[in-house]
Image (cartoon, rainbow, N blue to C red):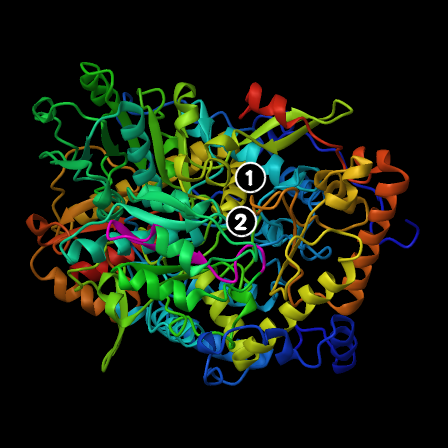
């Protein structure tokens, strides 16, 4: 691996926070005590938390060193399938840090909050344009809360029709959040098997769809990176029995400007602003999971809604059929304004984003399919799914290859998901990666395929370059040590 | 477009490798009836400089300190955020990573979250804290759902002195579950009135907020003792101002089973209400019923200390419809900010800062008392409090608003019985001079 981008370098050991510092240090400039101390009932007060006392330098060194143990999009390609690890523009951080936004209290009188309300109103319109679904709420704080909002709308819709329903259909390729969100709303999750082509067949859906079933949750493109070609017919089957179609928009990055969700028969869709609209993933959030619905279902959206009135933008609570609230305020506004900045920076070029995301995945698929088993050899969308079948003879697994990829300087793809594919390797390059980066990734994957055949032990003992080697996850779960 | 690296030549080479003639050809397999018929009708792209000007103008229309003085908390608090937190958070290794699924190259995030979990348990006096929930409101909803799972009971009791938005979120989450929600009234002193608690039968949980929405510090120890009669009822303590626990006896010491709340005060800008930070902690016996991610300590093959995501069998990606929650992406970066903030303050600093918040708010309470405002609730408060205003205040408040001061939050719309009552807040960002100016203007 001579020309690999991955290498080793000087990083630092760093103890836990409470293993450093000295009593009496403080890393914060405390404001002066300009008023008298006032007594407080001593039965209500305590000792205060046992936090370590650190200086400003202690804190800066600590977190700088920890940060250097992380892989990130800004380091190199991060092809984590289904997560859309695209580049996060730096200008978004400038916008989010503007004092007028960062310092805005959510309960400001509305005439003092027109800028934020305008951003929310306009972003809703932009997302409606991109999806084809006319009514939008930005309130859900992440994708799975968007799903929950969608399921609450399923419940509210059927209840308003006088007949609550008990089941929801979910394909076997779905993200785990789908059945968990349905269950949170009291629905029984009924699994629909995908067909030999990796997608839903209208017949399989028709066999399960009945008038006890509230609807279906579909991810399109699905988690195999395949477009659900039969979605229109599936939607017709579900609608004919009075059900609703929920689309998980986690994979929207494949189809902006190309597909119309309303035409497809979708009634409710959530988006992940932290995926498609390029807001930073932050080591696991915060995200934002807006929900887009048809005109018919608009009345159920969470409150408050942002409305435009002659005197300006207003928050409106007067929606008696609304499901209520899923967030204390209006959702993750700080993420919303980054997505708004992203759309303003690209405009109609969002279509080009999707075209290039699909181009990149298709290029990887073409370049790797001789060396890695492709369970569904069909045109892929924004991601492609391989398996470890060709490496089985060498007793090398998907996990081994993923770990070895770290030594070559790449973040591994999503592995062992979707569950319907044995040993899945799910690669989503995103449009951010240039041809030369893709070529380097492809070369690394080819080298790994060679190593699997020639020196499999190298893979089984990988990774070697990161700060730690493989960690004992079984011991961590058997004897949980969750705080120090 | 500067985010899209492909040159026309590269696109041509790549298409040739794939065996397709044009970018449109990549989508040829999509059925005609699913396609968009029109081009995206979005504004033309802005340059970086045009975007700056556009956003500056929008931000300019917002009322924010230091230009404005906002004497309002109610679940979103202004605290100074040290510059180190802003800069350390922008380290791209934290900022542009995702959920640490691959622990060997995510130790920075994993150790940080382990430290977060530890500091939160120390703050709240609990055994175990998760890696974060969305916000205080959904954390409370998840806590009550967890209590329903543990107790297998069908009714929860929620104090009316809990943040009204948190209660609305609980109602929304519970609508399809068939679980009943009883509202506990607040008493004359501004604390939850538990006198009728015995009348409600078998309760899964009793939930209080402390300091509560009125800023009043609940008597958690007494409440826990009164719940002892029914050991299956879980005591859930919520909060919207975690800084209070720099000074107050922690909920764990008072007998709480689940503690949940909003962590925005810890180094996270208010950002018009989000992103914030749902903090969530419980006792070890309830660990397996807990929602959300957990980071645990382990060792690598050479015996070196390291950290991994653990106990994932509770979570949606393994357990699917039988998971303890549907949460996946949480508020990781906000938890990171809170860890940095708690570390920077330290045990000595958090106590002094909490004390200052209390003292400043007490000063304002007394100064407003001298200006004809009455304090309707006798219970001690932390950094916010309710006053009943003289009649002419509502007009003065509007005039003050035009001068850039937001003098309290009117409560009449939320609590009809509290017409003419306002919730005021003073943190360490509000100086004595600011408060003196406010009182002078109110009297004038």
Residue B244 placement, left or right of B294: left
Residue B221 drawn above or below residue B80: above
Residue A156 drawn above or below residue B118: below
Return the residue nearer the eye: A96 or A356: A356
Quarter residue A129 falls in: bottom left
* 1 or 2: tag closer to the N-terminus: 2
Q: Which mark is residue B55?
A: none
- Magenta segment: A208-225
Percent of width and height locating residue A61: 69, 41
Q: CA distance from mark 1 to mark 2?
A: 9 Å
Return the residue nearer the eye: A469 or B316: B316
User: Would residue A108 be seen by someone viewing this image from the given angle?
Assistant: yes
| Disc 1 secondary structure class | helix
Percent of width and height locating residue A483: 53, 25
Indicate whether residue A219 is drawn in magenta: yes
User: In the rendered picture of this protein, how many numbered marks are placed on residues?
Assistant: 2
Mark 2 packing: few (<14 Cα in 10 Å), some, or many (20+)?
A: some
- Whether labels 1 and 2 belong to a single chain: the reply is yes
* Quadrant for the C terminus of chain B in the image: bottom left
Percent of width and height locating residue A331: 37, 57
Q: Are marks 1 and 2 in contact (CB under 8 Å)?
A: yes
User: Would residue B248 be seen by someone viewing this image from the given angle?
Assistant: no
Mark 1 packing: few (<14 Cα in 10 Å), some, or many (20+)?
A: many
The residue drawn where x is 10% and y is 34% is B187
Q: Return the chain for callout 1.
A: B
Q: Which residue is mark 1?
A: B344
| Disc 2 secondary structure class | loop
Percent of width and height locating residue B36: 46, 79
The residue drawn where x is 27% and y is 20% is A43
Q: Return the chain for callout 2.
A: B
Q: Which residue is mark 2?
A: B82
Indicate whether residue A457 is drawn in magenta: no
């Amino acid at each position: 691996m001579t020309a690999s981008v991955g290498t080793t370098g000087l990083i630092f050991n760093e103890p836990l926070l409470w293993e450093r510092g000295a009593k009496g240090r403080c890393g914060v400039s405390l404001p002066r005590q300009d008023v008298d101390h006032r007594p407080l009932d001593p039965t209500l007060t305590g000792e205060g938390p046992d936090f370590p006392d650190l200086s400003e330098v202690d804190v800066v060194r600590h977190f700088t060193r920890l940060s250097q143990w992380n892989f990130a999009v800004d380091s190199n390609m991060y092809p984590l399938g289904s997560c859309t690890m695209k580049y996060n523009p730096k200008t978004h951080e400038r916008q989010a840090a503007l004092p007028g936004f960062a310092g805005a209290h959510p309960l400001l009188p509305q005439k003092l909050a027109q800028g934020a309300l305008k951003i929310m109103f306009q972003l809703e319109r932009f997302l409606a344009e991109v999806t084809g679904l006319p009514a939008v709420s930005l309130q859900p704080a992440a994708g799975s809360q968007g799903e929950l909002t969608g399921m609450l709308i399923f419940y509210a819709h059927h209840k308003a029709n006088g007949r609550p329903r008990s089941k929801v259909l979910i394909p076997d390729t779905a993200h785990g959040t789908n059945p968990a969100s349905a269950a949170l709303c009291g629905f029984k999750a009924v699994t629909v098997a995908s067909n030999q082509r990796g997608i839903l067949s209208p017949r399989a859906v028709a066999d399960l769809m009945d008038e006890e079933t509230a609807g279906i949750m579909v991810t399109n493109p699905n988690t195999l990176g395949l477009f659900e070609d039969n979605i229109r017919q599936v939607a017709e089957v579900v609608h004919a029995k009075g059900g609703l179609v929920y689309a998980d928009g986690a994979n929207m990055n494949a189809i902006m400007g190309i597909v119309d969700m309303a035409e497809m028969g979708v009634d409710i869709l959530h988006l992940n602003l932290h995926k498609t609209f390029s807001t930073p993933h932050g080591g696991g959030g915060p995200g934002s999971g807006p929900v887009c619905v048809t005109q018919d279902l608009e009345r159920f959206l969470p409150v408050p809604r942002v409305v435009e009135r002659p005197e300006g933008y207003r928050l409106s609570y007067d929606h008696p059929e609304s499901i209520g609230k899923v967030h204390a305020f209006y959702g993750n506004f700080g993420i919303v304004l980054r997505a708004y900045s992203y759309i303003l920076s690209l405009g109609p070029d969002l279509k080009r984003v999707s075209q290039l995301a699909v181009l990149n995945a298709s290029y990887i698929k073409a370049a790797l399919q001789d060396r890695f088993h492709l369970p569904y050899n069909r045109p892929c969308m924004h991601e492609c799914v391989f398996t470890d079948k060709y490496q089985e003879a060498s007793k090398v697994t998907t996990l081994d290859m993923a770990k070895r990829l770290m030594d070559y300087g790449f973040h591994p793809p999503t592995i062992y998901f979707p569950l319907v594919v044995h040993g899945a390797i799910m690669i989503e390059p995103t449009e951010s990666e240039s041809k030369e980066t893709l070529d380097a990734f492809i070369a690394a994957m080819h080298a790994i395929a060679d190593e699997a055949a020639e020196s499999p032990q190298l893979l089984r003992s990988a990774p070697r370059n990161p700060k730690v080697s493989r960690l004992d996850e079984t011991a961590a779960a058997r004897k949980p040590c969750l705080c120090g | 477009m500067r985010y899209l690296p492909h040159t026309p030549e590269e696109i041509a080479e790549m298409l040739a490798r794939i065996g397709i003639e044009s970018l449109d050809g990549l989508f040829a397999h999509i059925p005609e009836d699913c396609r968009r018929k029109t081009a995206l009708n979005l504004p033309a792209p802005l340059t970086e400089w045009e975007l700056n000007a556009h956003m500056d103008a929008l931000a300019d229309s917002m009322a924010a300190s230091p230009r404005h003085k906002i004497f309002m908390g109610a679940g979103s608090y202004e605290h100074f955020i040290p510059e180190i937190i802003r800069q350390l958070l922008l380290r791209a290794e934290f900022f542009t990573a995702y959920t640490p699924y691959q622990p060997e190259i995510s130790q920075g995030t994993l150790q940080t979250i382990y430290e977060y979990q530890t500091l939160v348990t120390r703050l709240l006096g609990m055994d175990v804290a998760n890696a974060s929930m969305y916000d205080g409101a959904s954390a409370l909803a998840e806590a009550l759902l967890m209590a329903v799972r543990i107790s297998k009971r069908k009714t929860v009791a929620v104090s009316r002195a809990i943040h009204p938005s948190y209660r609305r979120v609980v109602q929304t989450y519970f609508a399809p579950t068939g679980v009943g929600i009883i509202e506990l009234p607040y008493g004359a002193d501004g604390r939850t009135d538990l006198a009728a608690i015995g009348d409600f039968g078998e309760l899964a949980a009793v939930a209080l907020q402390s300091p509560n929405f009125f800023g009043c510090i609940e008597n958690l120890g007494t409440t826990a003792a009164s719940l002892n009669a029914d050991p299956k009822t879980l005591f859930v303590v919520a909060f919207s101002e975690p800084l209070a626990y720099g000074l107050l006896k922690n909920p764990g010491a008072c007998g709480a089973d689940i503690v949940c709340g909003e962590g925005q005060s810890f180094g996270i800008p208010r950002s018009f209400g989000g992103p914030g930070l749902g903090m969530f902690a419980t006792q070890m016996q309830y660990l397996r019923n807990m929602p959300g991610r957990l980071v645990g300590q382990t060792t690598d093959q050479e015996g070196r200390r390291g950290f991994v995501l653990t106990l994932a069998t509770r979570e949606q990606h393994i357990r699917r419809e039988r998971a303890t929650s549907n949460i996946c992406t949480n508020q990781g970066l906000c938890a990171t900010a809170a860890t940095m903030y708690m570390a920077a303050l330290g045990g000595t600093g958090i106590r002094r800062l909490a004390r200052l918040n209390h003292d400043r708010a007490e000063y304002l309470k007394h100064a407003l008392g001298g200006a004809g405002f009455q304090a309707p609730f006798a219970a001690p408060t932390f950094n916010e409090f309710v006053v009943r205003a003289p009649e002419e205040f509502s007009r003065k408040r509007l005039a003050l608003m035009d001068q850039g001061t937001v003098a309290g939050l009117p409560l009449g719309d939320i609590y009809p019985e509290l017409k003419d009552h306002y919730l005021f807040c003073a943190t360490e960002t509000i100086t004595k001079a600011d408060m003196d100016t406010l009182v002078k203007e109110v009297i004038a």
